[in-house]
Amino acid sequence: MTTKAELEIELEKLRARNAELKAQVEQKPESDEGAQDSTLTKTKDEIRKSLEDHGIDIKKIETMGDEVVEEIHKLQEHYPITVLLVAFTLGYVVGRVQK
């Protein structure tokens, strides 16, 4: 079992590491943030182009998503217990996979 002294030492190490990271963030120039934004936009454009190259239309995907939400709503109205059990099971499985 861990002692209080060991925990306090670990806490001090974490505080020192936190201070180092804060200092690094303060020293970084703000131009890096703009570069990250352009990289993110570039990545989105690349993904969109790649999907189009493979014949996948994003508008169809968005429409299909709306249809799925509508179907789940109808299912929830007719079989509420089933939807509750499915949601619980899905949450449980995702939680177990995350560990």
Image: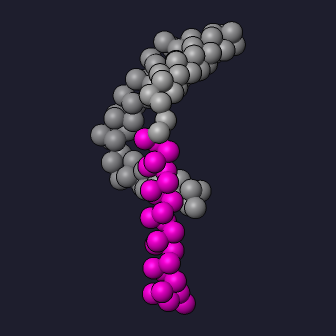
Let me know if residue 27 is in the magenta part.
Answer: no
**Residue bounds of the magenta highlight:** 1-26
Q: Position of residue 14 (x, y in %)?
A: 49, 65
Q: Is residue 56 visible to the viewer in this orientation of the structure?
A: no
Position of 72 relative to 66 (above/below): below
Q: Is residue 55 left or right of residue 58?
A: right
Q: Quadrant of the C terminus?
A: bottom right
Q: Residue at x 36, y 28 (%)?
A: 70
Place of residue 6 in the rendered image (x, y in percent of width and height, measured from the top left): 52, 83
Say which of 28 and 71 sits in front. Answer: 28
Identity of the residue drawn at 52% across and 18% down: 38
91 w.r.t. 4: above or below: above
Residue at 34 percent across and 41 percent down: it is 76
Position of the N terminus by quadrant? bottom right
State how many labels appear: 0
Question: Is residue 10 found inside the magenta-colored segment of the image?
Answer: yes
Q: Position of residue 90 (x, y in %)?
A: 49, 52
Q: Relative to 55, is 8 above or below?
A: below
> Which residue is pictured at 68% across the width and 9% down the height?
53
Point out residue 27 in the picture as x, y percentages from the top left corner: 47, 39
Q: Residue furthest right?
A: 54
Of 43 and 20, the residue lying toward us: 20
Q: Magenta stretch: dominant SS?
A: helix
